[in-house]
Amino acid sequence: MLLMVLGLGIVTSYAQTTTPKIGYADVDYIYNQLPEAKQIDADLKSLQAQLKNQIDGKYQEFQKKLADYQANINTMLEPVRVNTERELQQLQQNIEKLQQDAQTTLQNKSVQLMDPVHKKMGQAIEDTAKENGFTFVLNQQIQGLDVILYADEKMDISDLVLKKMGVTPKPVTPAPATPQPK
């Protein structure tokens, strides 16, 4: 009997020490509160606008040459028509390549700017979890989809992470409620 009580006590104490403490963080919320977030977003929007202007300029050049070609096709000599068609085809290919290059440039710049922020957030989440005894920390959403369908707000470490990063969390104003039909 004594052996059974001791065994039960050991199992109970082991179960209590191995119970995982699970928290969650809203990485988007944390990112949007960081001072560097606005600058990163502004840099990416600026680069996107520059790339769009380059593409638009090439597209306008293409449109102008196409309109000229269409207006004069009936009066063009055969070699001139063939050469113009080749030029138009080349311009169109250049525009497509420019669009692909622009997308790659934008993605690379985003990675370049976001990588240090992701590392900083990851380290702050890890440090916060360790300091507060969390075994696991989950992301609240992934690509806009809820991962956590219900959680006690006391387990949200987002504000603790922000404080760890030296940022004072700003209160989030809730969206106005939409009236329900009667």
Image: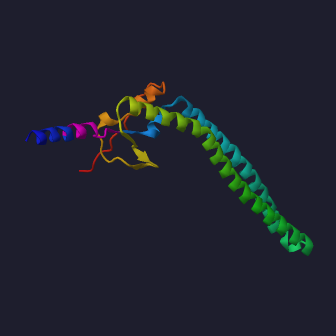
> At 19% across and 39% down in the image, what residue appears?
12
Bounds of the magenta segment: 12-22
- Tell me: 51 left or right of 25: right
Q: Return the residue nearer the eye: 59 or 104.
A: 104
The quadrant holding residue 20 is top left
Q: Front-most of 146 and 67?
A: 146
Comparing 124 with 176, the one in front is 124
Left or right of residue 123: residue 174: left
The quarter of the picture where residue 99 lies is: bottom right
Residue at 49% x, 34% y: name it.
123
Task: Name which residue lies at 15% across and 41% down.
Answer: 8
- Quick one: 14 or 152, which is closer to the camera? 14
Residue 111 location (% of width, % of height) = 61, 43
**Residue at (44, 31) in percent of width and height:** 127
Instruction: Judge whether residue 41 can be spotted in this image.
Output: no
Q: With 42 as the anchor, is 140 left or right in this view?
A: left
